[in-house]
Amino acid sequence: MIKYTSVSDLVNPQRAALEALSLKASDQLVSKATDGKVLCLLFFNNSLRTRLSTELAGIKLGMKVMVMQIGENGWALEFEDGVRMDSTKAEHIKEAAAVVSQYADVIGIRSFPTLTDKEADLSDRVNSAFVRYASVPVFSMEGAVEHPLQALADAMTILENKGLNRPKVVLSWAPHPRALPHAVANSFILMMQRQEVDFCITHPKGYELNPSVVGNSQVVYDQDEAMANADFVYVKNWSQFEPYGATKSGLDHWMVTPEKLGNAKFMHCLPIRRNVIASDLVLDSEQSLVLEQANNRTFSAAYIIKKLLESKGV
Amino acid sequence: MIKYTSVSDLVNPQRAALEALSLKASDQLVSKATDGKVLCLLFFNNSLRTRLSTELAGIKLGMKVMVMQIGENGWALEFEDGVRMDSTKAEHIKEAAAVVSQYADVIGIRSFPTLTDKEADLSDRVNSAFVRYASVPVFSMEGAVEHPLQALADAMTILENKGLNRPKVVLSWAPHPRALPHAVANSFILMMQRQEVDFCITHPKGYELNPSVVGNSQVVYDQDEAMANADFVYVKNWSQFEPYGATKSGLDHWMVTPEKLGNAKFMHCLPIRRNVIASDLVLDSEQSLVLEQANNRTFSAAYIIKKLLESKGV
Amino acid sequence: MIKYTSVSDLVNPQRAALEALSLKASDQLVSKATDGKVLCLLFFNNSLRTRLSTELAGIKLGMKVMVMQIGENGWALEFEDGVRMDSTKAEHIKEAAAVVSQYADVIGIRSFPTLTDKEADLSDRVNSAFVRYASVPVFSMEGAVEHPLQALADAMTILENKGLNRPKVVLSWAPHPRALPHAVANSFILMMQRQEVDFCITHPKGYELNPSVVGNSQVVYDQDEAMANADFVYVKNWSQFEPYGATKSGLDHWMVTPEKLGNAKFMHCLPIRRNVIASDLVLDSEQSLVLEQANNRTFSAAYIIKKLLESKGV
């Protein structure tokens, strides 16, 4: 199935980032593969940036965009096979995905993890079911495990801002008052593992991410040591993977400050809590790339949608 | 008033189904009557299939589509004349319909019945008021009494799948955990009464539909007898008409199985509860037409919208 | 900054109303400045008329329109500088406005006042912050202090319906069961002060509006005296400015009737509560201009959006 629900779907992530930057530089994004085609965006969870940037990607490609806010309560889907559907779930994913894919040429889906049902989350249930039952290409606008459009935009932003040398890129955990998903961190790790960068991850003990994602990537528990001489520092909160969805207190000192950042560029996927994740001085400095990352979301989406419609591997 | 809020509005339902199939077969749905025109879809109740298929119909016709989720609580309308509006209802239907019709060339409306206020439901209050006060054509995307776009899609599906002989079509009640409206059943009955089919209805005693809809159609209380030698079995739950909105328990055996279905094609408007309305074996068999019905919704909507904009009777 | 969040932003309100009427009379609203451009409409509060008329304005201008219902709870923004964002507010307006403006060529915003936090309301917090941090033009679809698109549509409606003589225009308070904002009244006053009309305001004692808005405009506490020989009577409820957001009871006799109206034309921004604000006889008479006002909303919006995109002062 032609899809983009994981950075792993990219055959060549370096080429993808380069080609997405070419698309961004182009005056004309409309092509025969996209002109007049129908893009359907299904939101099982709220979204601002992803909604607007992906809709704009469709517009720039000459597509017609249908946006559907399904909401957290609005449309309870059954995912299990063979169940007697006599409770609150009004429709099985088999029919839902098959029907929606009759109305569109490509489907984007946003669906957050539960952070309580680890098994369901790890199966990326909603995306996986749409991929299985839809008859058109499907891409993720952030799923239970990954946020692959964000990671492609991030790779583009690093490419645009790096110097001539191989850059050092650090992913740092940062504090947050709520328990957050792992999707952004997971996709960023999978992307950096396949780019021409020196990469390491830093977080407090206990915040280890899924080992099958981290793989051989270096983990440094001392934030200062990890960030020393970094060119790019990507900051993000996530909850614990073990116990699943848990959080710890007393870690406010992991907030990123100008002192910690040094000369590195600062990256974050937004929305960001000022003076919790990073201080005002960081966000208001010229070292911050957060707006450029958000802008690149439009073009990472446009690139992926175009590739999917050309029936090529992404 | 040119409108489509009931199957009864169709001058010739057989010709309508044939012409809608021609439209479906056409490469080019855009016509002078529809190109660049504005379609406004107002949802007083939630919708997935109807929303996407009707928006897609507008797109295929070259129209601009404005979709408005009004919600169940969002916009309380007054329908009574002469009332002092000092409670929760902020706007009278007179102004609402007249204003919205200044912003669009044609208006589609979804509004469910209360299933408690029989008189209000039978008057199809929301659709009727829009028809009365709007200055442009109005069509129903399922009202309190009928779902006429669904019935036209169903007639198209039967035409596409019937053999050379006059088919036997059965409408069968089926179990459901909630009390559901009569709209789909009503419109299907009114449509079948005017197609070249042998038609009968089967349901448990107590589930008699509105006599003014059923008319002379045959009702058989034995489901097996009714379904014998059927070519098409349309399955649907509905609540009782008398007492209005009531339900009975102990009727799970009305679920449709391969044994009951025999060689007939299986039809349902979706969403469907698997292993309650019909078993997995029925839905996953090649006898199921549910996806074709859903696909035909796009073209039944396109046909009706086009006819309304051509200022002809539907 | 090029913006339209207040009638005061209009360099020449008389010319604006005339030019907006020319645009309305034109067959072709698409221009090079607007064709294919992206209009983003952000709704922090619900809307029917404003939503549809502004979306339609974008469509008529040849634009692509992205509509975002942010809702009252959906997206809690921080407006204060230097705050540690560790409570419920997930994003600072600095990032939100800067990001959204990367996705659009012009942004429209609807945001109601609190009617409890006077200082926040008077600063027109949401609009002001977007104007400050967005990189593209911003206009108000009703803010905490003004509803300037409505006032421009109202001026157009008066121009279309006045005779050869300088008309007498009266703004009259009317009863309502809830405490309502001042925005419509404020913008209408600021508009009438700069049109070729004789203008006065009438309301019960205690309902004095913001003195900095009322300025030198005449206030008459006797409704009959104020309305005598009026050509246009604009009726609207508002809550007290002092104490802020308060209401008084026992004022039902301020409802407008045919006797009070005399030969004047009747105006209201809608939605209107029949037999509370004005009687059925007034609303159903030929003296009512409410539908024409609503229709002119499309063209006041189109005029403003076009001007903003031409990078000229409005």
Image: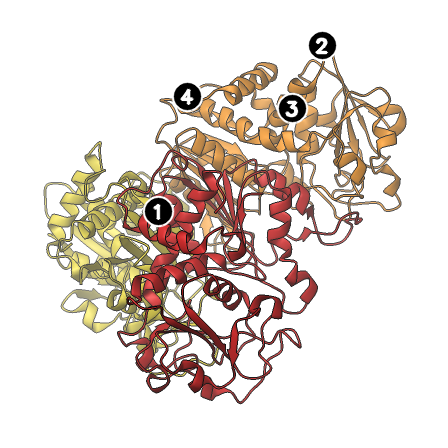
Chain colours: A red, B orange, C yellow
Indicate which disc, 3 or 2, sits on the residue closer to the N terminus: 3
Residue under the image location 22 percent in, 33 percent down? C28
Q: Residue at x 77, y 20 (%)?
A: B231
The amino acid on which the numbered mark 4 sits, given as a three-letter code, is: Glu
Identify the residue at image location x=45%, y=88%: A253
Which numbered disc flags the more N-terminal residue, 4 or 2?
2
Callout 1: few (<14), some (14-19), or many (20+) C-alpha neighbours within 10 Å? many
Label 4: which secondary element = loop
Q: Which residue is mark 2?
A: B164
| Chain for numbered disc 2 | B
* Badges 4 and 2, same chain: yes
Residue type marked 2: Leu
Residue density around tag 2, few if under 14, some if 14–19, many if 20 or more, within 10 Å? few
Cβ atoms under marks 4 and 2 closer than 8 Å: no
Q: Nearer the viewer, residue A311 or A59?
A: A311
Give residue C65's mark: 1
